[in-house]
Amino acid sequence: METLLEQIDRAHLPQHVAIIMDGNGRWAKERGEDRLFGHFHGVQSVRDIVEASAEIGIRYLTLYAFSTENWDRPQAEVAGLMELLVNTVRREVDQLKKNGIRLHVIGDFSMLPPSARQELSEALDLTAENDQLHLILALSYSGRWDLTQAFQQLAQKVQTGAVRADSIDADTISDHLSTRDFPDPELMIRTSGEHRISNFLLYQLAYAELYFTETLWPDFRRQHLFEALLDYQQRERRFGKTSEQLTT
Ligand code: FPP
């Protein structure tokens, strides 16, 4: 019996997988624990998914770790999550460096405490030479924030004459998003049974295949990722064309 991993066609992997890691709070509640307990266990899933993605040959992995809306959660949860994120990055950075993984962070950093910004920027520098897997943490991120900052940059360029308004096309907009250095995700996974994009990569997910699973994030391991990849490989990506046009 072929394992899930053996069934995956390595030649047709998505280059970029984006994940909304949802369900930590419910996972903790089911166990009568505090929400932070769920986030803490979610880090084990992050580690397993990052490791498996690097091993299988995914080039870009974006994880939605903290949304701009998450700042409105109870102060203790926000502080605990920030601490967990920064501590995890600090603890794992040597391993990332050793395994060829380059860390990137996208989001509104003006909201982050200065100490967190400092820690993250050191981690970014330490892994800057790596190129096997690009691990992109969406932190204090939202799709609308990203589009807004892109339009602000473009409006300024139009004002100074650096860009002509009638020359702006879809690529110009992509080039001003925080994801300008990465290809668009071909696969977006959301855990915990919610069927929403929740202000994630709004522009970048235009053609992504969406995969939803009931599994809560702290239970999501490489086998679940492999299931999502197999499901992706069974789909036909038409980009608005017909099946016949794709085969001829
Ligand atoms: C959503 O679950 C999850 C988050 C808001 C935080 C995700 C962060 C981690 C898993 C830690 C990641 C660490 C690194 C280094 C990337 P929820 O709290 O909304 O769950 P619920 O919907 O069940 O309430």
Image (spheres, helix red, strand yellow):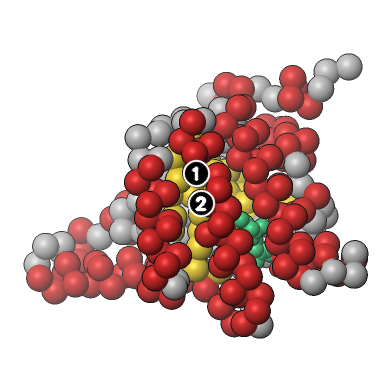
Q: Amino acid at mark 1?
A: Val
Q: Amino acid at mark 2?
A: Arg
Pointer 1: what residue? 93
State the residue in front, 223 or 155. Answer: 223
Give neighbour class at mark 1: few <14, some 14-19, many 20+ (Cα, 10 Å).
many
Q: Position of residue 82 (x, y in %)?
A: 56, 67
Marks 1/2: CA–CA distance: 6 Å
Quadrant assignment for ligand 1: bottom right
Give neighbour class at mark 2: few <14, some 14-19, many 20+ (Cα, 10 Å).
some
State the residue in front, 58 or 168. Answer: 58
Rendered-image quadrant of the N terminus? top right
Q: Position of residue 48 (x, y in %)?
A: 68, 40
Q: Residue at x 77, y 64 (%)?
A: 37
Q: Which mark is residue 90?
A: 2
The residue positioned farthest toward the top in the image shown: 1
State the residue in front, 236 or 205. Answer: 205
Q: Are marks 1 and 2 in contact (CB under 8 Å)?
A: yes
| Residue 230 location, quadrant | top right
Quick check: 35 above or below 192? below
| Residue 26 location, quadrant | bottom right
Q: Position of residue 198 (x, y in %)?
A: 61, 68
